[in-house]
Structures are given as C-alpha cells and as structure tokens.
C-alpha cells in the first residue's frame, strides 16, 4: 500500500508565460511634445491588458508605434518575436495579418454587404478560399460575435453595437494571435457597451488570443482586463489588476478610480 502523503507534492518547474508583445523603453516625441518617455509594457499569450490613460496621454500613439504606423524615436517594439522597426513593408504586412486591430470608427465599407466586408481581409492578404470554405468562415465568425443572421445585410442596416461586432468578426476571420482594441466601447450605450465587454472576454477564451485594449471607460477596464497599465506622463506609471490599483492610495492612480 502506498504511504499517505505527508505534505503537498513539490511544485513542478514554473514555466514563464509566453510573451507575444513587448514595448521596451519606447520614447516618441512630436517636436517638444514628449508623448511616450521610456514606456515599457509586456503582453503574454492569452492575456488581456488594458492601457488606461487620460485623453491625450498617448494611447493612440502607442498603438500606432506597436503596429509600425509610427516609427519610435528610441526603444524597441517586439510583436510575436519580431522587432517591428526592423521589418520591411511586406514583412510588416504579414505580421499585421496576425494582429487584429479594431478601430474606434469600426471602418466598415458601407457599399459592401456584411459578408463582403468580412471577406475583405482574406482578399487583402491574398488568402484564397473556395466559396463553401468562405461561407463556413463567414458563418463561424458571425456566430462567434452573435450575429449569425446578418451576412446579407448592409452596414447601414446595423446598430452601433452590431457594427462593432461585425468589425470584430472581420478581424477574427484571420484568426489573429493578438487583438488591439481602440476604445471599444466609446459611443455605445451602457447596455451595448457591457455586451461588447463580455464579447471581448468570450473572444479571449475562444480564440486564446491576447488583447491590448486602450480605454478610459472604467467599466470596460474592470470587465475586460486581466492586468491594467496606467499611462501617465508618457510612462507606464503603475501596473496591476483592477482591484490592486483601485486599492492604491497614490492620488495619480486614485483619480482614475474615483
Ligand atoms: N501625428 C502626430 N503629429 C503630431 N502630434 C501628434 C500626432 N499624433 C498624436 N500627436 C499628439 O500626441 C499626443 C497624444 O495623442 P493620442 O492621440 O495618442 O492621445 P490619446 O491618449 O489616444 O487620446 P484620446 O483618449 O483623446 O484618444 C497629443 O498631444 C497629440 O496631439
């Protein structure tokens, strides 16, 4: 007979979570406007990180540096192991296919049906599929965002929340490893905003995707973030879970949670 264990079994070797995106000591200025100053942040596989900052603090600039739309003045941005500033045009294009970007505006093509909008990224990246495969992909992403019946509708027939879902579906069709959300709940009523927050969580689980979310909607932060990074005066001023930061006495942190 085996002896009863007397203590908890020794823990196995801890495996560090895989980093999918890192911003390392990045600075970015426009003339005398020093927007990012030695800013650092890491995103791990399967994790949702919200960057919280006041209006004009540099959140959009940060996202643009991450996807290579703006060159950094100093520091390094690594996405899926690649140094973004070292990539040429076509390599950057390939990398962007693995990084879904949900714009604040949703940017749907009004003259195309939902189905055509969803197929656009496949065509843009020259990913050819048979008609039945396309139907399956479209059906799958529409189901994932809870809008299975909308393939033949025009964007003008959709509500703001539905447009946001379709924009997300269009990003998901490429099965991105990382999602970048730019103010995903801005302009939505509180109920619809909450549905989008829940959808962000569902996508995280279903696609095992990592997400960097920029927001100043505290409900969105609370509902979607595994970790929050505070962008203050160009730096990552503080990091932690929503609850950890909420309990800090520091006035610069507290003002976000007041
Ligand atoms: N291309 C540019 N040229 C010059 N200045 C810029 C440029 N892009 C952004 N800025 C400046 O960088 C600063 C940060 O802007 P950014 O749009 O990143 O703020 P934000 O945190 O996203 O704000 P909001 O929450 O209001 O969208 C602002 O002072 C803005 O004027």
Image: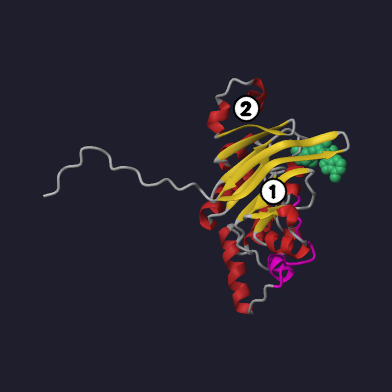
What's drawn in magenta, residue-wise?
A: 105-126
Residue lying furthest right = 31
Q: Give the percent coordinates (x, y) of residue 130.
A: 63, 79
- Of 112 and 100, nearer the camera is 100
Residue lying furthest left = 1
Disc number lying in front (2 or 1): 1
Question: Can residue 162 be seen by looking at this rendering?
Answer: no
Label 1 element class: strand
Label 2 element class: helix
Q: Residue at x 57, y 29 (%)?
A: 245
Quarter of the displayed picture in which ligand 1 can be seen: top right
Q: Residue at x 70, y 37 (%)?
A: 39
Instruction: Find out if the beta carbon at label 1 lies less than 8 Å from the nearest ligand 1 atom.
Output: no
Q: Give the percent coordinates (x, y) of residue 220.
A: 62, 40
Residue picked out by circle 1: 77
Lower sequence index among marks 2 and 1: 1
């Amino acid at each position: 007979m085996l002896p009863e264990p007397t203590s908890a079994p020794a823990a196995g070797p801890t495996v560090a979570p895989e980093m999918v995106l890192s911003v390392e000591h990045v600075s970015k200025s426009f003339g005398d406007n020093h927007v990012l100053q030695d800013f650092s942040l890491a995103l791990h596989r399967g994790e949702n990180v919200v960057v919280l900052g006041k209006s004009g603090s540099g959140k959009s600039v940060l996202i643009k540096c991450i996807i290579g739309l703006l060159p950094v003045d100093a520091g390094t941005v690594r996405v899926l192991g690649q140094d973004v500033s070292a990539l040429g045009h076509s390599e950057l294009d390939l990398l962007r296919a693995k990084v879904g970007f949900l714009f604040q505006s949703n940017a749907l093509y009004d003259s195309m049906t939902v189905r055509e909008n969803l197929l656009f990224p496949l065509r843009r990246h020259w990913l050819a599929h048979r008609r039945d495969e396309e139907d399956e992909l479209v059906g799958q992403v529409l189901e994932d965002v809870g809008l299975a019946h909308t393939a033949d509708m025009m964007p003008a027939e959709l509500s703001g929340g539905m447009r946001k879902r379709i924009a997300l579906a269009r990003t998901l069709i490429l099965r991105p490893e990382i999602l970048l959300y730019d103010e995903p709940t801005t302009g939505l009523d509180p109920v619809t905003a909450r549905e989008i927050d829940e959808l962000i969580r569902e996508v995280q689980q279903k696609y095992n995707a990592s997400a960097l979310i920029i927001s100043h909607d505290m409900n969105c932060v609370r509902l979607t973030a595994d970790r929050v990074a505070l962008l203050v005066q160009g730096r990552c001023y503080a990091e932690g879970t929503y609850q950890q930061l909420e309990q800090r006495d520091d006035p610069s942190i507290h003002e976000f949670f007041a």
